[in-house]
Amino acid sequence: EMQKEKDATFSQMFGDLSSDVRRLCLTQHQIKNFVKKHRNWLRTEGYATFFLFESKGHFFVASVDVHSGGRLYVSVRLFGSAHVWDAELRRRLVVPKLA
């Protein structure tokens, strides 16, 4: 979960984990598998779980929320977005295990 004391953009959140964001990317297949197999790890009640992925040379973040009744809501945002996320909401980031 986002443990930062300050609000952050995607670039800042993921950049704190590795200076090489490619190492933090999952494939779209891996993201789907994670959501299916580890649904209980996803944030609920409108809070997002973020997954970084690359497509056609561009970086994106898939935002997955579990709403009431267990319904999934998925949106895709540009990694380079200037939007600043509120740290108090403790977003969850899913990345590959880094060696």
Image (cartoon, helix red, strand yellow):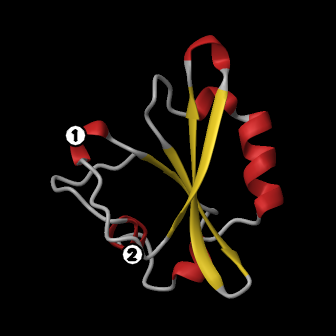
Q: Tell me the kind of residue under disc 1.
A: Glu
Question: Does residue 99 appear anywhere in the picture?
Answer: no
Instruction: Please give the residue where the numbered disc 1 appears in the rendered image.
Output: 88
Residue 88: which quarter of the image? top left
Q: What secondary structure is found at the residue carrying circle 1?
A: helix
The residue at 70%/34% (across/down) is 38
The mark found on residue 9 in the picture is none
The quarter of the picture where the N terminus appears is top left
The residue at 47%/41% (across/down) is 48
Question: Is residue 62 shown above or below 91?
Answer: below
Q: Residue furthest top?
A: 69
Q: Dot 1: few (<14), some (14–19), or many (≥20) neighbours within 10 Å?
A: few
Question: Is residue 38 shown above or below 21?
Answer: above
Q: Tell me the kind of residue under disc 2.
A: Gly
Q: CA distance from mark 1 to mark 2?
A: 19 Å
| Side of 25 relative to 87 (left or right) | right
Location of residue 26 in the rendering, given as x and y in whole percent from the top left corner: 69, 65
The residue at 68%/30% (across/down) is 39
Question: Does residue 23 appear anywhere in the picture?
Answer: yes
Q: What secondary structure is found at the residue carrying circle 2?
A: helix
Location of residue 89 in the rendering, given as x and y in whole percent from the top left corner: 29, 38
Location of residue 47 in the rendering, given as x and y in whole percent from the top left corner: 43, 34
The mark found on residue 15 in the picture is 2
The quarter of the picture where the C terminus appears is bottom right
Q: Nearer the viewer, residue 15 or 68?
A: 68
The residue at 74%/84% (across/down) is 56
Specify which label sits upstream in the sequence, 1 or 2: 2
